[in-house]
Amino acid sequence: MSYLIKGEHIDLGYEGMAIVRDISFRIDEGDYLCILGENGAGKSTLVKAILSLHQPLRGQIEFSSLIRKNEIGYLAQQSSAQKSFPCSVEEVVLSGRVNSLSSRFFYSKEDRRIAMGNLDRLGIGDLAKKSFSSLSGGQMQRVLLARALTACKKLLLLDEPVTGLDPHTTSGFYSLIEDLNREGLTIIMVTHDIHPALNYADHIMYLGRGYFYGTKDDFFQDETGLRFLKEAGHND
Amino acid sequence: MIEMLSYPFMQRAIIVGLLVSLSASLLGVSLVLRRFSMIGDGLSHVGFGALSIASVLSLSPMAVTIPVVVAAAILLLRLSERSKVSSESMIALISSSSLAIGVMAISYIKGTNTDINNFLFGSLLAVGKSDAVFSIILSSLVLLAYVLLYPRLFSITFDPSFSRASGIKVERYTLMLAILSALTIVLGMRMLGSLLISALIIFPPLSSMRVFKTYRQVTLSSAIISIVSFLAGITLSYQAGTPVGASIVSINLIVFIIFSIIRIILKRN
C-alpha cells in the first residue's frame, strides 16, 4: 500500500539534546494511529515535526505525493487561541480554510459551506453566531475540532483532544473520530487515554521507556505494550 | 467649522490625521489582541528620540525617523517574542532612554524647549505637503493590506500556532504589521505628539471590545471610532485652542467610558 508520511531513523529534541531517538514509522492512507507515552516523552514534539513546526535533529519526515502539507487538520493540546478573543464561532471555524486560500484573498461560498457543514456535523450548528469567549470548555474544544476538520482533507492530527471533556462528550468525540476514519480520513491521535488505543486504533506508536511502532495487535503482544496495559490498569 | 477647513495647513492636517488614525486603529486591533501594544508605545518614544536628533543636526525629519523607527520595530518585536517579563522591562528601558536622549540633545545643543513641547504633544503646523502625500500613499497601503489579508490576519491573530501548522508564514506577517505600525507612528507623530500617538493604536480596539463580540464588528467599530474621535478632537482643538493630540486622546477616553457604560447596561439586561 502507498504511504502518506514516512520517517526513518529520526531524532527529535531541543538545542541538540535528543528526547526521542531513532524512531521509524510509516503512516498509510486510512490508518488510525494512536501515539502513547509518558509526559515529556516527545509526543507533542513528534506532532510538531509532522506539521513542519519542528525540525528533527536527525532524519527527515517525508510526505508522499498523496498528501500535501495544507491537507492536514490540527487540533493542538493547548490551543494558543486566547479564550477572551472577540470573535464568533463562525469566524473561528471558517479560519480553518485559511490553508486553502493559496492565491485567493477572501473565503468563497464553498469555504463557508464546508465550515458550516462541520459545525452541523459536530452538533453545534446553533452556536455559529455565538461569541467564542462565551462558550464552555467542552464547547470551545468542539469548535476547535470543527476548525481542524475544516482545515483537513486527508489527515487529522489530534494532540490529546479529550483533555477537559466530560465522559459523555468524550465518548461522543471518539465515535465521531471513528466515523471520520471509516470515511477514509487518516487519524493520528496523541493520547493518555487507553480506550481509543484499545477500541479504535489500528496502529500504535509508543514513546518513552522503549519505542514501539506497529499494528495494535502486535503492540499488545509486545512487552512494551503489556507493560503499558498493566500500568493503565488493564491486567486481563 | 467651515472656517477651519479653509486653511491649507488645516486641510493637510485633517487628511493626514484621518488617514493616520484609521490606519493606527486597524493595526491596533491586531497589535492589542496579540499583546503587542507595548510595541506601539515603545516606537513612539524611539520616534521622539530620532526626531530630536534630526532637529539638532538639521536633517530631514522623515529621513532620520523612518529608518530608526522601523529598525526599532524589528528589534522590539524580537524582544517581545522572547520571555514576557524581561521584554516588557526592555521596552520600557528603550522608551525612556530614547526620551532622555532626545531631551538631552535638544536642550543642550539648542537650549530651547519649544521643540520638545511640539515633539511630545504635537503641532498642527508640523504637517507639510510631503507629509500629506506620503501619508496618503502609506495609509492606502495599510488599508489595502488590511482588507486583502483580513482572513489571514484573523487566523494569525487568533491562533498563531494553528496558522503556522496551516502553512502561513506567521513571522513574516507579524513583521509586516510592526513595520506598517512604525511608519504610521512616524507619520502621525509630529502632528499628534509622540507621547500621545500610541493612544490611537490602543484606544479604538479596546473601546470596541467593551461592546462588540465578533472580530468583524470590533474591526469596523475601531475604524469608525478612530474617524469620529479624530474629527471631534481636531474640531475641539481648533475651537478651544487645546493641543490637537491631547484633544483627540480625550475624546477617545470619553468614547471608552461610554462604551464601558454600554457594556455594563448590556450585561444587566
Image: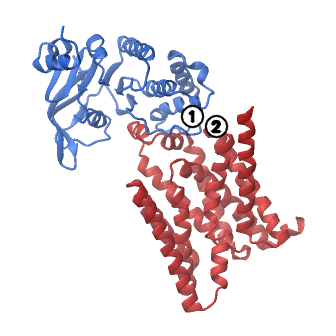
Chain colours: A blue, B red
Q: Is residue B239 above or below residue A121?
A: below
* Residue denoted by label 1: A133
Query: Mark 2: which secondary structure?
Result: loop
Marks 1 and 2 sit apart, C-alpha to C-alpha, by 8 Å
Instruction: Give the letter of the chain under mark 1.
Output: A
Q: Residue at position x 56%, y 22% from top?
A: A116
Seen in the picture, residue A172 relative to B175 is either above or below; the reply is above
Residue A214 appears in which quarter of the rendering?
Answer: top left
Q: Which x, y percent locates residue A76?
A: 39, 32
Question: Among all residues in the image, which is located at the extreme left?
Answer: A223
Residue B95 in picture, x, y percent from top left: 50, 69
> Residue B205: where, in percent of width, then height?
63, 49
The three-letter code of the residue at mark 2 reads Lys
Using the rendered image of the protein, determine whether residue B49 is visible from the camera's viewpoint.
yes
- Which residue is found at the position 71% from the left and 67% from the top? B246
The secondary structure type at the circle numbered 1 is: helix
Determine which residue is flagged by label 2.
B213
Using a 10 Å C-alpha cutoff, classify the residue at mark 1 as few (fewer than 14 neighbours), some (14 to 19) or many (20 or more).
some
Residue lying at 71% horizontally and 75% vertically, measured from the top left: B123
Q: Quadrant of the N terminus of chain A?
A: top left
The three-letter amino acid code for the residue at tag 1 is Ser
Please name whichever residue, B12 or A78, is drawn nearer the observer in this view of the structure.
A78
Graded by Cα atoms within 10 Å as few (under 14), some (14 to 19) or many (20 or more), the crowding at tag 2 reads many
**Which residue is most to the top?**
A236
Q: Is residue A96 left or right of residue A11?
A: right
Nearer to me, A146 or B150 = A146
Compared across the picture, whether A99 is left or right of B31 comes to: left
Position of residue B223 in the picture relative to residue A62 (left or right) = right
Q: Nearer the viewer, mark 1 or mark 2?
A: 1
* Pick the front one: B39 or A166: A166
Q: Check the picture and name the quadrant holding the C terminus of chain A.
A: top left
